[in-house]
Structure formats: structure tokens, C-alpha cells
Image (spheres, rainbow, N blue to C red):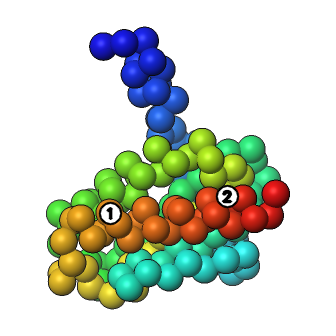
Amino acid sequence: MTHDSTSNTQTATFTKAQRLLTPTAFRNVFDAPERKIHQSHLMAFVRSNEVTYPRVGMAITKRKVPTAVARNLIKRKIREQFRVKSSILQNKDIVFIVKKSIKDIDKKELTHQINTIFKKIEKNKNEIQ
């Protein structure tokens, strides 16, 4: 293992500070999002925050995703992509919701939709600068 791969692993972390934890934090994003990004099954609410790093939250309901296994899979995929992309997202709060049941899509398509949302957030950031 080279030194470079070790440093990349260390920078791509997911700390408690990077999570939206309180109902108030979620409400702030839901009540006044700067942007809503839609995919066929997922949606993200995006809003700038007062801190210097991005934060992510997930509101994945039993009604849309009945099994815990499926809900945990979605959360794991979102966290995985967030870790990789967090260095380029700046100070954004992002809340993911599931718009409709994910029974009819596979893991690859789920990952693609999550990536597309992050790319749109990143693209918007580049246009603003």
C-alpha cells in the first residue's frame, strides 16, 4: 500500500459532525431549500449552512422502503458517495428522501441516481463561483 492511498482513505471520512442529527436541522433544510434535485426514485433538498463543511441527512421512511435491509442499503450508498464527494461540496446541508419505492431498481441504478444528485450539486457550486 502506498502512502498516497493511505492519505486518501483518511480524508474520505464520515464524522458525526457531517451528519444532520436534530429535527431542527432537518426542518431548516426542508422549510427553505435553495435547491431540490429530483431523480426517478430519490430527491435531495440542498441548502447552504453556516459551518465550513457539508452535512448530509436521510429521511427514508418505512412507507416507501418497508424493509430495514433496503433502508440501510440506501443509507450506506448515500454515505459512501458523500464521503467521496464531501471535499468538493463546500458548506451545504443535503437531505435525501425516497420519492417512490425502490423495489424496481437495482443497486447499480440506485448508486447512479445518488451520484447524479451529487454531480448536480457540484455543478451548481461551480456555476456560482
Report whether 20 appears left or right of 59. right
- Amino acid type, label 2: Lys
Tell me which corner region of the image, top left, top right, bottom left or bottom right, holds residue 123. bottom right
Return the x and y of residue 4 as percentages of the image width and height.
45, 18
Q: Distance between the residues labelled 1 and 2?
A: 20 Å
Residue in view at x 60 percent, y 42 percent: 87
Which residue is labeled 2 in the image? 92
**Residue 68 in view of the camera:** no
In the structure shown, which secondary structural element does the residue marked by tag 2 occupy? strand
Q: What type is the residue that disc 1 sits on? A: Thr
- Out of 8 and 77, give the one closest to the viewer: 8
What is the crowding at mark 2: few (fewer than 14 residues within 10 Å), some, or many (at least 20)? many
Q: Disc 1 marks which residue?
A: 111
Give the percent coordinates (x, y) of residue 127.
Answer: 75, 65
Numbered badge on residue 86:
none
Give percent across and percent down for residue 89. 63, 52
Is 3 positioned to the left or the right of 102 in the image? right
Q: Residue at left 72%, top 59%? A: 126
Write down the quadrant of residue 37 in the picture: bottom right
Residue at 46 percent across and 44 percent down: it is 84
